Image (cartoon, grey):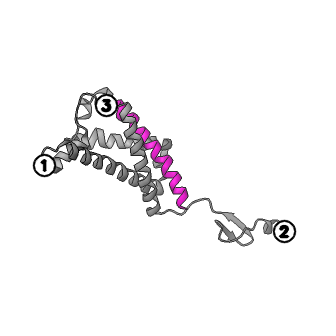
């Protein structure tokens, strides 16, 4: 009877199952892949950047015509003042490019360090905000130091970065599942 019971646990080979003698064990962990993590994160970063951009139209961080960090960076790179059309194109390229690359980095990190996805991606969004708006951007002279930023800027950036992180995680996990 024991042999019959064990045989009933056998499953076809090649369907996500491993066989150990007469007992089959379902594989519960997916194969880690840097390329799949990067791709899933890249797609997620693009979608999350769109969500963050849309949210900032309703709750902008800067309300008194202060330049956006991508605008300041675009002029620093160009070395001169840019006309409105060129400025819009350059700053949007920087904004979307950074969002896509941040997403790709997140996808790669999540692939090998799943704890990075804590709080449904909100932790990633807040970590990204801290790294960029409170540290790197002020250090590069692209925005005011964190202590000089308005409470509106802090709350808008926090809210929209949490949104970015949550959207990035939802899309990353969906795309990553489709790539298996």
Which residue is drawn at the image coordinates 40% and 55% (left, top)? Answer: 104
Which residue is drawn at the image coordinates 28% and 49% (left, top)? Answer: 94
- Magenta range: 153-180
Q: Residue furthest left?
A: 80
Residue 165 coordinates in the image, percent (x, y)? 43, 43
Residue 121 coordinates in the image, percent (x, y)? 46, 44
Element type at marker 2? helix
Task: Report which residue position mark 2 lands on.
Answer: 4
Element type at marker 3? helix
First along the sequence among labels 2 and 1? 2
The span from disc 3 to disc 2 (Cα, nearest Å) is: 67 Å
Q: Closer to the camera, 8 or 180?
A: 180
First along the sequence among labels 3 and 2? 2
Q: Is residue 69 left or right of residue 122?
A: left
Q: Examine the rendered structure and indicate whether residue 141 appears above or below residue 148.
A: below
Q: Closer to the camera, 143 or 136?
A: 143
Task: Report which residue position mark 1 lands on.
Answer: 79
Task: Report which residue position mark 3 lands on.
Answer: 153
In the picture, the quarter occupied by the C terminus is bottom right
Q: Examine the rendered structure and indicate whether residue 48 appears above or below residue 156.
A: below
Magenta part, dominant SS: helix
The span from disc 1 to disc 3 (Cα, nearest Å) is: 27 Å
Q: Is residue 156 visible?
A: yes
In the picture, the quarter occupied by the N terminus is bottom right
| Mark nearer the viewer, 2 or 1 | 1
């Amino acid at each position: 009877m024991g042999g019959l019971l064990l045989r009933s646990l056998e499953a076809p080979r090649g369907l996500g199952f491993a066989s150990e003698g007469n007992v089959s064990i379902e594989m519960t962990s997916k194969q880690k892949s840097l390329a799949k993590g990067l791709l899933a994160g890249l797609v997620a970063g693009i979608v999350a950047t769109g969500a963050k951009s849309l949210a900032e139209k309703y709750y902008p961080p800067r309300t008194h015509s202060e330049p956006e960090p991508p605008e300041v960076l675009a002029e620093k790179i160009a070395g001169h003042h840019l006309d409105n059309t060129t400025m819009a194109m350059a700053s949007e390229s920087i904004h979307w490019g950074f969002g896509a690359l941040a997403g790709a980095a997140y996808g790669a990190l999540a692939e090998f360090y799943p704890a990075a996805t804590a709080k449904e991606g909100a932790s990633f969004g807040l970590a990204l905000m801290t790294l960029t708006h409170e540290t790197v951007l002020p250090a590069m002279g692209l925005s005011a130091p964190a202590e000089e930023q308005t409470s509106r800027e802090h709350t808008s950036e926090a809210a929209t970065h949490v949104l970015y992180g949550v959207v990035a995680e939802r899309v990353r996990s969906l795309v990553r599942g489709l790539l298996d």
